[in-house]
């Protein structure tokens, strides 16, 4: 009879919730494998969701421990992952045209807009801020901010952040088309392909760390680890470390991060009405981010001479979500005119969005931490 | 242009809706604050967090609007400083290259 005791638990009070979590876990695994949506994270998260929602699950304790050391204690996993991400990013398209950074800044509008919306709906300000950071379109930043602020909705925020990042190719195109005219989408931009000196590439990560560290000291861990990864890449004498950071380190942490997040996906914590609300607010954040980036490009076009107009679509890449967002913009440009190559411009905006989203995270932390 | 007008009017409509709600709620919140102050704060403190009730919170919204402004100004200031520094670095790099070419 003892053998079936746990099976019977599923049919007792609240047991159905575990079954629902299995279905959610299954859906995440399906999206990861069949639709290839952020498989590196959605698959471990989906499997982890099933693992922690088995009655009397023995794995829960182990995964909880991973959460304690990897996320709860100084957010180690997201920070180490940032070293890998920093090593992957080439800032050259941004450095050749630094004004692209303005789009990255404007595209963080969704974060602050969602902060207002979430607080309007009655979330505590620290929860509202954690929900808003979904708009950073950057998983590690979302985890870092939500955990530092001690949000009660960390799991829902992480799932929303990663799901919407995967959904960028579905979410952004209709918004971009709605906010731009065909004439604007056809604007061609010249890419000069200017060379950037090695000194600039080396000094850039150091200077950004110092500037952001002075303005938003709470974000210095995030920006510092990101820029440290980039410095390893650009210094030219640590190629093997750079490769390790980009591949082995990033992959290793990603495996643990996904399954660790699942520790907060227990039925009682996850199956709440607020989770749905958070998913909705996350979507609003992504939409308003896209809108903000496009609008600033339109505003700049008013003042720019006719031959130097900016294709406003590239503003949408400021959402971060590196590199999906840049690819989406490039693809939309080609759809309108197959000789309109926007990739280098949108990549420049996209990496600036990565920096701006960390700055936004730091500012949010400095307001509430 | 037509689409832009649609988007702008949607935003305007939403803002109007929220403003009406916010003012109504801010008034309610003020009334309840006064009631709380009159009652005193001797109520028992419960350590367990009660389940969140979804309600329109005008006061927090107004506060968060201030943070929105502060946040966006902060991001733009930091960004412009970084843009300026990069522009200087690029100019310096170009100058060095020109000197080498001479």
Image: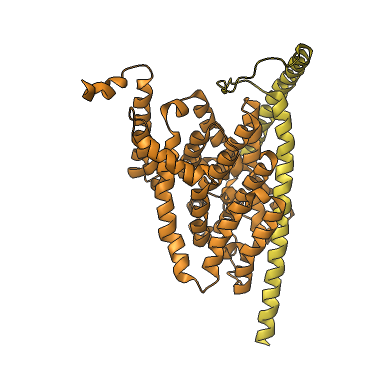
Chain colours: A orange, B yellow
Q: Nearer the viewer, residue A150 or A37?
A: A150
Question: In the figure, B93 relative to A314: above or below?
Answer: below
Task: Say if B21 sits above or below A307 in the image.
Answer: above
Q: x, y percentage for residue A360? A: 64, 46
Reply above or below: A239 against A54. below
User: Which x, y percent locates residue A136?
Assistant: 58, 45
Asked where in the image residue B89 lies, by quadrant, the reply is bottom right
Question: Quick check: can you spot residue A26?
Answer: no
| Residue B9 placement, left or right of A5 | right
Image location of residue A347, percent across then percent down: 54, 58
Q: Is residue A172 left or right of residue A248?
A: right
Residue with the most extreme bottom position: B102
> Considering depth in this image, is A262 or A142 the residue closer to the camera?
A262
Q: Is residue A177 left or right of residue A15?
A: right
| Residue drawn 60% across the image and 43% down it | A289
Residue A1 appears in the picture as rendered? yes
Q: Quadrant of residue B61?
A: top right
Q: Nearer the viewer, residue A49 or A103?
A: A49
Which residue is located at x 66 percent, y 32 percent? A116
Residue under the image location 49 percent in, 39 percent down: A158
Can you tell which quarter of the image residue A230 is in?
bottom right
Q: Residue at x 37, y 43 (%)?
A: A44
Quarter in which the N terminus of chain B is drawn = top right
Q: Does A238 sit above or below residue B2? A: below
């Amino acid at each position: 009879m003892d053998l079936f005791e746990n099976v019977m638990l599923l049919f007792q009070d609240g047991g159905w919730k575990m079954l629902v979590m299995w279905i959610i876990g299954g859906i995440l695994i399906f999206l990861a494998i069949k639709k290839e949506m952020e498989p590196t994270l959605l698959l471990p998260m989906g499997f982890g969701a099933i693992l922690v929602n088995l009655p009397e699950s023995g794995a829960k304790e182990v995964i909880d421990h991973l959460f304690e050391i990897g996320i709860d204690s100084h957010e180690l996993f997201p920070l180490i992952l940032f070293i890998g991400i920093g090593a992957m990013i080439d800032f050259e398209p941004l450095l050749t045209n630094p004004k692209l950074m303005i789009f990255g800044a404007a595209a963080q509008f969704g974060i602050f807009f969602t902060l207002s919306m979430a607080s309007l709906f009655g979330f505590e300000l620290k929860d509202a801020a954690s929900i808003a950071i979904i708009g950073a379109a950057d998983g590690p930043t979302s985890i870092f901010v939500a955990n530092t602020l001690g949000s009660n909705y960390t799991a829902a925020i992480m799932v929303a952040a990663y799901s919407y990042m995967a959904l960028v190719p579905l979410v952004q195109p209709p918004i971009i088309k709605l906010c731009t005219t065909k004439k604007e989408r056809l604007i061609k931009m010249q890419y000069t392909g200017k060379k950037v000196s090695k000194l600039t590439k080396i000094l850039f990560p150091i200077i950004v760390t110092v500037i952001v560290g002075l303005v938003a000291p709470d974000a210095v861990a995030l920006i510092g680890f990101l820029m440290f990864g980039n410095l390893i890449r650009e210094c030219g004498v640590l190629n093997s470390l750079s490769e390790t950071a980009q591949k082995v380190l990033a992959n290793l942490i990603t495996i643990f991060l996904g399954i660790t997040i699942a520790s907060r996906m227990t039925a009682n914590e996850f199956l709440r009405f607020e989770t749905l609300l958070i998913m909705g607010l996350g979507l609003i954040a992504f939409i308003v981010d896209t809108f903000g980036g496009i609008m600033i490009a339109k505003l700049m076009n008013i003042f720019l001479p006719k031959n130097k107009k900016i294709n406003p679509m590239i503003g949408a890449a400021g959402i971060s979500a590196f590199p999906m967002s840049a690819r989406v913009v490039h693809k939309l440009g080609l759809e309108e005119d197959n000789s309109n190559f926007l990739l280098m411009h949108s990549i420049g905006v996209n990496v600036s969005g990565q920096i701006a989203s960390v700055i936004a995270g730091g500012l949010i932390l400095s307001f509430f931490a | 242009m037509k689409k832009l007008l649609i988007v702008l009017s949607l935003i305007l409509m939403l803002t109007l809706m929220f403003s009406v709600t916010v003012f109504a709620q801010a008034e309610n919140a003020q009334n309840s604050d006064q009631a709380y102050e009159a009652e005193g704060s001797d109520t028992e403190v419960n350590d367990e967090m009660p389940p969140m009730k979804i309600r329109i919170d005008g006061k927090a919204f107004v506060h968060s609007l201030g943070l929105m402004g502060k946040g966006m100004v902060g991001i733009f200031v930091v960004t412009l400083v970084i843009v300026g520094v990069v522009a200087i670095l690029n100019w310096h790099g170009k100058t060095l290259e020109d000197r080498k070419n001479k």
